């Protein structure tokens, strides 16, 4: 059996973890974040270059800040299990250990609390044998794989206690008892690794399918977009026109990256206007159908992000293919004609079903991968780039950057059009206002002529009123109108006053001399108002006109 085990290729390991030098002694509330996979950290801020992480941790521990964290964010948990565990640890200070100190502590923190509701580690092993997906998550499986005994542990002592009686095993510390129980499982390590492969397979399959499909669709769009082809033709024509007979002129084509130089070519009279702004205006006015290329490039930025991690995508695809082959070898060599399996062991049944389903779907993924690889290389060649020289994400980023710049230029063009429309509307409104003013002036002049009748004011030798006379007539007419308005308001005010006085003096005798005198004064005022209204506005105007003909001595 041992010789056969040696021919099995290695299977995938559990996820890498960043380890700390200090850990909380109690369970704390979790910080809800989304972890980045280790292979996504390259060239990101999380490489933490120039940052001494160990120094940070040592300062926090030395100054007691970590203890404050323990106090502030202690989780509300079932303390019964913790008390029992602590009591056992206190009782068993002299318990036998064969795991390294760090591994034993990590098991106590990351693994054993997951099994609080189980009566014993035997029940835990049965659920793992049954491939219980609720218990056997990718996190738990990864931790179990990480804490499998290795050369840093005392393997001889472990082998001794695997064969020991239950009474002897009880002398072991709790993490060691758990490991002993797990190591009784047939092909424990490879079982965990293939279970982890199964749990992660479909999520990775869906993500790879989605990403590969996106790259294929964007490659096809770039290859077949007629509007983008026309736009590039227009750019080439404008470039040759501007370069004229210089060395740069007369070009039959250009590097596709040149399209992002349009925004750098600024107008001589206005630095805020670029050749890209001009090109956007031309296409909107003369070739509006070219604007459809924006729809064709709508997903190019997403494709650029995918191709930036194309090596990771290829690595995941390769791992999935290799692990399916390893699963075939495992099931065909290690699980055939096995008769002494535990009754609860469903590993063979579950993994055979997974192998069948995964192999069929992986064939589709393999075809998609081959198609994607051919598509992006073909479209790069179509645009004059060498896929062996240029990175695919750099190629897609050229179009992503251009699409963003075009969108911004379109927005600037919209603002320019709106500003021009507002200016045109302002001019139209000003012209309409001036036209109304001229019409009103002409109407006033006509009214003055009608009011004047036969007694027209002196005219200039040319037969028209002088400008000063016209201005004077306008002022006179305005005064007449305001005078009539003031008289009318005055009469209405006096009527209201009389009404109030009558109401207040109902109890005063009508024969009172004071009342008669006031009444007589009001009657005199009313007669004056009446006489003023009897004066004809036309007669007053004539008198004023006659006075205006008298020379004014300076």
Image (cartoon, helix red, strand yellow):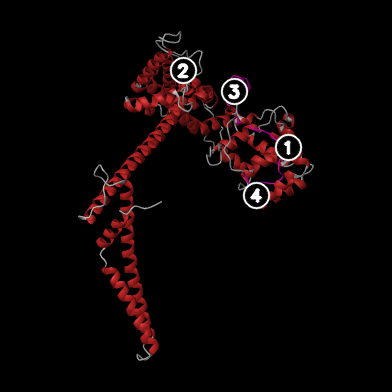
Q: Nearer the viewer, mark 1 or mark 2?
A: 2
Q: Magenta residues, as a range?
A: 1-30
Instruction: Look at mark 1 in the image and give the residue it sits on.
Output: 57
Badge 3 density bin: few <14, some 14–19, many ≥20, Cα 10 Å: few
Residue 284 in magenta? Answer: no
Would you identify the image quadrant in which residue 288 lies?
Answer: top left
Q: Nearer the viewer, residue 69 or 549?
A: 549
Disc 1 or 2, which lies upstream in sequence? 1
Q: Position of residue 246 (x, y in %)?
A: 44, 9
Can you tell which mark lies on residue 522?
none
Q: Secondary structure at mark 4?
A: loop
Q: Are marks 1 and 2 in contact (CB under 8 Å)?
A: no
Q: Position of residue 9 (x, y in %)?
A: 58, 21
**Label 3 – label 2 distance at C-alpha:** 49 Å
Q: Nearer the viewer, residue 58 or 3?
A: 58
Residue at 28% across / 71% down in the picture? 531
Q: Position of residue 153 (x, y in %)?
A: 73, 30
Instruction: Look at mark 2 in the image and give the residue it sits on.
Output: 258
Residue 28 in magenta? Answer: yes
**Label 4 – label 1 distance at C-alpha:** 22 Å
Residue 187 visible at all = yes
Disc 4 or 3, which lies upstream in sequence? 3
Instruction: Look at mark 4 in the image and give the residue it sits on.
Output: 75
Residue at 39% across / 24% down in the picture? 279
Q: Secondary structure at mark 3?
A: loop
Q: Nearer the viewer, mark 4 or mark 3?
A: 4
Badge 2 density bin: few <14, some 14–19, many ≥20, Cα 10 Å: few
Q: Nearer the viewer, residue 120 or 513?
A: 513
Q: Secondary structure at mark 2?
A: helix
């Amino acid at each position: 059996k041992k010789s056969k085990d040696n021919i099995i290729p290695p299977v995938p390991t559990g996820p890498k973890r960043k380890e700390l030098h200090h850990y909380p002694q109690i369970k704390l509330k979790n910080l809800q974040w989304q972890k980045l996979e280790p292979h996504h950290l390259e060239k990101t801020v999380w490489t933490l270059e120039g940052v001494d992480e160990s120094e940070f941790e040592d300062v926090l521990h030395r100054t007691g800040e970590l203890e404050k964290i323990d106090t502030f964010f202690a989780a509300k948990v079932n303390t019964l299990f913790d008390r029992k565990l602590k009591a056992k640890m206190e009782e068993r200070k002299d318990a036998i250990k064969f795991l390294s100190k760090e591994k034993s502590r990590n098991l106590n923190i990351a693994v054993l609390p997951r099994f609080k509701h189980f009566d014993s580690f035997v029940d835990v092993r049965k659920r793992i044998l049954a491939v219980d997906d609720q218990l056997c998550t990718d996190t738990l499986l990864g931790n179990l794989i990480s804490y499998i005994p290795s050369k840093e542990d005392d393997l001889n002592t472990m082998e001794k206690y695997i064969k020991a009686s239950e009474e002897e095993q009880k002398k072991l510390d709790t993490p060691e008892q758990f490991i002993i129980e797990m190591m009784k499982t047939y092909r424990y390590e490879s079982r965990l690794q293939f279970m982890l492969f199964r749990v992660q397979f479909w999520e990775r399959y869906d993500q790879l399918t989605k990403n590969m499909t996106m790259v294929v669709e964007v490659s096809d769009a770039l290859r077949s977009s007629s509007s983008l082809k026309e736009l590039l033709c227009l750019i080439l024509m404008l470039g040759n026109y501007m370069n004229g007979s210089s060395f740069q002129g007369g070009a039959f084509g250009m590097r596709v990256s040149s399209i992002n130089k349009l925004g750098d070519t600024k107008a001589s009279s206005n630095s805020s206007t670029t050749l890209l702004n001009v090109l956007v205006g031309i296409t909107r006015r003369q070739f509006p159908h070219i604007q459809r290329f924006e729809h064709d490039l709508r997903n190019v930025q997403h494709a650029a992000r995918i191709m930036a991690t194309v090596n990771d995508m290829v690595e995941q695809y390769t791992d999935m293919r290799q692990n399916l082959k390893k699963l075939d070898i495992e099931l065909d060599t290690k699980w055939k004609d096995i008769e002494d399996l535990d009754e609860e062991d469903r590993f063979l049944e579950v993994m055979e079903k997974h192998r069948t389903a995964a192999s069929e779907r992986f064939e589709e993924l393999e075809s998609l991968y081959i198609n994607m690889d051919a598509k992006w290389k073909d479209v790069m060649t179509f645009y004059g780039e060498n896929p062996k020289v240029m990175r695919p994400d750099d190629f897609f980023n050229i179009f992503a950057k251009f699409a963003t710049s075009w969108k911004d230029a379109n927005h600037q063009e919209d603002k320019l059009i709106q500003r021009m429309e507002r200016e045109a509307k302002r001019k139209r409104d000003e012209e309409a206002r001036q036209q109304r003013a001229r019409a009103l002036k002409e109407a006033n002049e006509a009214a003055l002529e009608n009011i004047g009748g036969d007694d027209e004011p002196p005219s200039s030798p040319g037969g028209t009123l002088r400008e000063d006379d016209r201005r004077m007539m306008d002022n006179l007419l305005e005064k007449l109108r305001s005078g009539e308005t003031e008289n009318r308001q005055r009469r209405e005010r006096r009527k209201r006053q009389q009404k109030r006085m009558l109401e207040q003096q109902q109890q005063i005798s009508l024969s009172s001399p004071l009342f008669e005198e006031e009444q007589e004064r009001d009657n005199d005022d009313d007669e004056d108002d009446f006489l003023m209204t009897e004066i004809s506005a036309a007669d007053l105007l004539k008198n004023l006109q006659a006075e205006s003909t008298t020379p004014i001595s300076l």
